[in-house]
Amino acid sequence: MDNEKITLNEMKNDGGMVHLYYDRFVGFWVAYGYSGFLATHVIDGVISFSDELQMPLVLIGREDKRVLEENMESVEKSTGGYICLRMERPLRMDGYAKWAAVARKNR
């Protein structure tokens, strides 16, 4: 996965996008940072923390990915191991800092 792309996508995330990256080594889709936070408003993924990227992440299985796609307004981009989903309406990021701190503590 491209760490720069992940970081840039999350820095630009306005609360309306969920960026998913496929990790072929573990066989799960991964949402980092704001994307992970937003995804947990729709699905119950496994929450962890990336030491390398210094942001929380959510592991998303095949069924949860399908549920996410069904609950989003549209698929913005889809190329191999990357999908960008647009939410029907952006969510406020209230609670993100606390959620991220818990993810970091519980890793």
Image: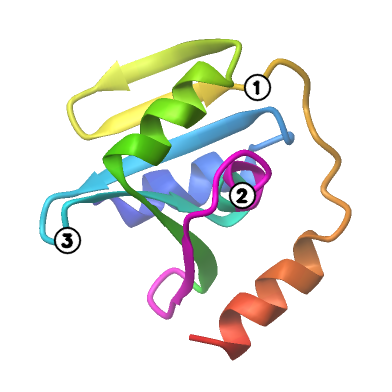
Task: Specify whether 47 is left or right of 95.
Answer: left
Looking at the rendered structure, which numbered label has been put on residue 101?
none
| Residue identifier under label 3 | 26
The residues tagged by marks 1 and 2 sit, at their Cα atoms, a distance apart of 13 Å
Asked if 91 appears above or below 43 in the picture, the reply is above
| Residue identifier under label 1 | 87
Report the residue at 62% width, 38% height from top: 42
Marks 3 and 2 in Cβ contact (< 8 Å) = no
Report the residue at 73% width, 34% height from top: 14
Q: Earlier in the sequence, mark 3 or mark 2?
A: 3
Task: Specify whether 71 is left or right of 7.
Answer: right
Q: Does the magenta-highlighted stretch encompass residue 82?
A: no
Q: Residues within 10 Å of mark 3 (few under 14, many from 20)?
A: few
The disc labelled 2 sits on which kind of residue?
Thr
The disc labelled 1 sits on which kind of residue?
Met
Measuring from the top left, give residue 106's x and y in whole percent: 56, 87
Q: Nearer the viewer, mark 1 or mark 2?
A: 2
Q: Which residues are magenta?
A: 37-53
The residues tagged by marks 3 and 1 sit, at their Cα atoms, a distance apart of 26 Å
| Residue identifier under label 2 | 40
Asked if 89 appears above or below 64 in the picture, the reply is above
Q: Earlier in the sequence, mark 3 or mark 1?
A: 3
Q: Residues within 10 Å of mark 2 (few under 14, many from 20)?
A: some
Measuring from the top left, give residue 28's x and y in whole percent: 25, 51
Taking the view exactly as shown, the residue that stands out farthest to the bottom is: 105
